[in-house]
Amino acid sequence: MSSSKQSYRPTTMAANGMITTPHYLASQAGLKVLQAGGNAVEAAIAALSTIGVVYPHMNGIGGDNFWLVYDAKQKKLKALNSSGRSGEGATIPFYQQQGYSKIPSRGALAANTVPGAVAGWEKAYQYSQNHMNGTVEWSELLQTSIHYAKDGFPVTPSQVYWTNLNLDDKDNEFRHLQRFTEFQKVFLQANGLSYRAGDIMKQPDLARTLEGLAAEGGSFLYEGELAKLMTTDLQLHGGVLTIDDLRHHQSNWVEPISVRYRNHQVFNVPPNSQGFASLSILNILNQFPLSNVEEGSADYYHLLAEATKRAFVDRDQYLTDPDFATIPLDEILSLRRGIQLAESIDFTSVRAFEKQLDPKGDTIWLGVVDKEGNAVSVIQSIYHEFGSGFIPKNTGIVLQNRGSYFSLDESHINCLQARKRTYHTLNPAMLFKNEQPYLIYGTMGGEGQPQTQAALVTRIIDYNFPIQSAIEAPRWLYGRTWGATSNSLKVEGRISASICIELERRGHEVEVLEDFTDVMGHAGAIQINQQTGVKYGGADPRGDGVASGY
């Protein structure tokens, strides 16, 4: 039974510029820049800084980002890795001496990697100035975010939900965030309760931080007054990051990685991102003529879930900071490997996948295309919702807990070492047709990102779904939820009972969730008609976003 190509909202179409983000105020911030003549990178920075304020549980300047930037003038795609490295004092013995067998998920000890996000904005901005005729002042790009931090914005139901979930005082490993004074000061009302949807929330500390960044650029965070404030308070609470760690941070331009899919070239970012897993799934699917597989049938869901498991085995064996290990990417993404993994898929039964998949990854993805044809696919995150939960006093910055993903087992591929980048779920994608951007796409959601990317690509490329329909169509997620000890195949309620029964017959442990659950992440996409230049944008009803163009 194929998914309907109908959508609840229309695909947005525009001839000049297009942006899609998971929060409408961020989409507006980026659109304003595009309409004023700014390019895709400038619009992305305005949107990224804004969404860090208005969607603070999902991302912000205490996190990391990864970029794909297409420079239309030079016909060149560039990748930017702006994830932070662990502090020099963040070592396995440091945690073991304090009695830890794993890095705490929350608090000062969870915030052991440098926040790379602002350095990413700045590096992309410099490139845009030097190579893409960038015209907008840096400080101008941060004005919308400063406005919402200072004057306030209406709180979303999403923020209310995640705040309340994190007030559970019986769970000190993952929840109970009100034990951190600054968290309480920033995210709760004076009576200790969370804001309600529609309440105006102001973040005066964050506004001052953003004003400092607008005036002084990234140096304010990486070596200036803010660096002092952040590291002093972190160390006071037992944290490891130092000013030297911040000063040492570098964001790097890296070569994008890619595979063929049908007649297209699909691009992603290299490790320490899991981008190669997203490509590996497509490399496997490319060996199957999907014209013989009905979209939305049991075969369709089975095939995509099984391809995912195989790609994840390779990912988990190798993914870490490439400066610390050799990752045989050419082999993993080779046609030979694609064929080999495809041949191991049996349509009548499932393959067991032992490793418990991580259920977290609260993140935002956004895409922008400008009138010159420049394109940006960028993803920004603080890892768990509200990151480490630790906000250095008077800064308003929620520090990420991405470094809690390091292993304290020395033999583990992703073991903790000083100044190392951890295994990262973040991966923005772009698909080229005729050697130029055709589809700019991505999603939030940790382990779900490669799976949702495969859903978008197959539905748009193989089954000709309109953009918005492809985003809204029923989704699945192979993995586990909080507290569960095993992985299951989670499906949205719109997938029929008969298909679920057939999937169970083949050996899948099926778990039916709500029709449009946010567990499936917030996806987005922009498709470009290469003949007319018209952009088709879509945003996910599972989030709070819109696609806007002009």
Image (cartoon, rainbow, N blue to C red):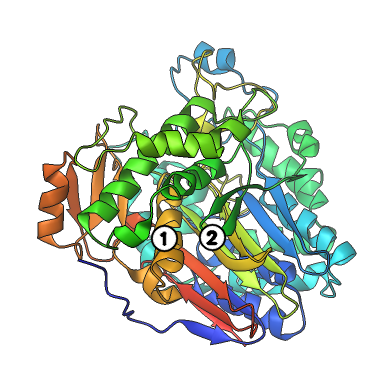
Label 1, residues with CA under 10 Å away: few <14, some 14-19, many ≥20: many
Which of the marked residues, 1 or 2, is nearer the chain's N terminus? 2
Which residue, given by chain and number where applicable, does mark 1 sit on?
A: 458
Q: Nearer the viewer, residue 423 or 177?
A: 423
Residue sitting at x 81%, y 74%? 136
Q: On the image, which quarter does residue 85 sit in?
A: top right
Q: Is residue 282 above or below residue 516?
A: above
* Residue 440, x across and y down, in percent: 58, 65
Q: Is residue 307 left or right of residue 62?
A: left
Q: Is residue 290 above or below residue 372?
A: above
| Dot 1 amino acid type | Thr
* Residue 80, x across and y down, in percent: 71, 50
Label 2, residues with CA under 10 Å away: few <14, some 14-19, many ≥20: many
Q: Is residue 450 above or below residue 146?
A: above
Mark 1: secondary structure: helix
* Residue 59, x across and y down, in percent: 54, 55
Count of number-bearing discs: 2
Q: Is residue 418 left or right of residue 306?
A: right
| Picture disc at residue 170 | none
Mark 2: secondary structure: strand
Residue sitting at x 62%, y 62%? 432
Residue sitting at x 79%, y 54%? 123
* Residue 228, x across and y down, in percent: 75, 41
User: Split into 4 quadrants, where in the image is the N terminus?
Assistant: bottom left
Residue 385 seen from this side:
no
Which residue, given by chain and number where applicable, does mark 2 sit on?
A: 365
| Dot 2 amino acid type | Trp
Residue sitting at x 53%, y 13%? 410
Q: How far is the residue under mark 1 from the one under mark 2?
A: 19 Å
